[in-house]
Amino acid sequence: MNREMSLLVIAPWGQQIGFLLGGARVRIATDAESLNAELKQVLEKKEVGIVALPESMRSWIYDKHRRAIAKAVFPLLAFYQFPEKWVAPEKAEEQVAEIVQRAIGYHLRIQL
């Protein structure tokens, strides 16, 4: 029996935008209770092959869900990390100006 399984991303509010733009199905979890409610649905429906969630949520997973996932073939849990601090590269203005010039053919002078 071949059955197509999907990817589900569970993210805190604010980290979901890139995944949504990439076409992933995303659920927001704000605490341990909401995360485990999502995991319970995943385990019951058996339609998700991979659940991606931030490393910071690993400790929120209830033991009963940990045990169920450990025994199951699917879903596979994939943990990701976001940088704690975003830093602009040196000469970011020049890089942005170059990208804009390549995209539209005009050189802009960007000053911050």
Image: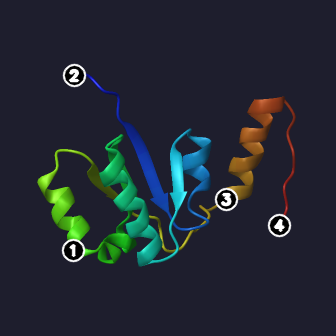
Circles 3 and 2, Cβ within 8 Å, touching? The answer is: no
- The residue identified by callout 3 is 91
- The residue identified by callout 4 is 112
**Closer to the camera: disc 4 or disc 2?**
2
Depth order, front residue of 15/65: 65
Inspect the image, locate mark 4, and give the three-letter code of the amino acid beneath it: Leu
Residue at the location (32% across, 51% down)? Answer: 44
Under circle 2, the secondary element is: loop
Circles 4 and 2, Cβ within 8 Å, touching? The answer is: no
Under circle 4, the secondary element is: loop
Q: Is 9 left or right of 94, judged from the image as shown?
A: left
- The residue identified by callout 2 is 1
- Between discs 1 and 2, the one toward the N terminus: 2
Circles 1 and 4, Cβ within 8 Å, touching? The answer is: no
- Between discs 3 and 4, the one toward the N terminus: 3
Using a 10 Å C-alpha cutoff, classify the residue at mark 4 as few (fewer than 14 neighbours), some (14 to 19) or many (20 or more): few
**Closer to the camera: disc 3 or disc 1?**
1
Query: CA–CA distance between discs 3 and 2?
Result: 55 Å
